[in-house]
Amino acid sequence: MNTIFYIAVAIAIVSSILAITNRNAIHALLYLIISLLSVSVVFYILGAPLIAALEVIVYAGAIMVLFIFVVMMLNIGMEEETEKQWLTPKMWILPLILAAILLVIFIYVLKVFQYEKTSAENIDPKQVGVALFTTYLIAVEIAAVLLLAGIVGAYHLGKQKKKTIHRFYVKSPSDKKGII
Amino acid sequence: MVTVSMEVQILFAGLFFLIGLIGFLVRRNIIFMLMSIEIMLNSAALVFVIAGSHWMQADGQVMFIFILTVSAAEVSVGLALILQMYHHYKTLDADALKKLLDSDVTEK
């Protein structure tokens, strides 16, 4: 089990270094997703199955998709070239190798270590839920308020402001300024 | 299950944090800076889970869920700010944001 821990940590560190040093945002996000998956393996080995699942679902599933959407939205005017560049198989080899190592680890862990063996040291989701909704109930409510503030802030900032043009002015396509 | 000592585990988490910090300080592209913040938050959460598994308490995992919440809220607002920044300045360079006032206000 220790070797699995070391392999997962090594993949996490290598892929996050590659994510930071990469020039292309999409490739960096790919490495960052690999890094999050390997941290999720570390969580599972440490006896936190709920956290491992949440890491995959929320971090790698939701937050990284948000990043990818914003990167896609910001690449204006150069879609064809960049897409051609992203789809080159050469760029996918290293992330695929790292992900394949993680997959092998995952299958090994599922096959060799049965749930009964590990349950003695696991902190199962029930314990987490009980702690979350009894001891930390007020913090859950504060987190709900924080998420509400996040929604309102993202909606307000993401709104495109309308340009104020005079009501008698018809904007022609050649005129960029929009001023009479 | 894992017999690696806790010091080594926290050392790895610290290394992970260091990578995020270096990325935050070195890169000027604001998307990469936000990604580095994600790495740092993730390493902090890793420390919480390591401590929670060391003392066999669920509190570490509860803290991870709160860090996840904070991170999700922060990313949504941060990405909306990036969109606004790109809309105004047509660049993702963080050094372009030197002035707080609007340019037409300063010209007057």
Image (tube, rainbow, N blue to C red):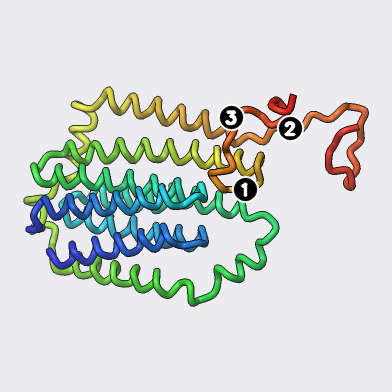
Q: Position of residue A26 (x, y in %)?
A: 51, 60
| Residue named by callout 2 | A162
Label whose residue precedes the other's in the sequence (3 or 1): 1
- The answer to the question of whether label 3 and label 2 lie on touching residues, with beta carbons closer than 8 A, is no
Residue that badge 1 annotates: B91
Image-quadrant location for residue B82: top right
Would you call the spot at circle 1 few (<14 residues within 10 Å), some (14-19), or many (20 or more)? some
Quarter of the view holding residue A102: bottom left
Instruction: Give amino acid for label 3.
Output: Leu
Alpha-carbon span between mark 3 and mark 2: 21 Å
The amino acid marked with disc number 1 is: Thr
- A35 with respect to A30 (left or right): left
Which numbered tag is attached to residue A23?
A: none
**Which label belongs to residue B100?**
3
Question: Which of the two residues, B21 or A25, is positioned nearer the viewer here?
Answer: B21
The local secondary structure at tag 3 comes to: loop
Most extreme residue toward the front is B107
Q: Secondary structure at mark 2?
A: loop
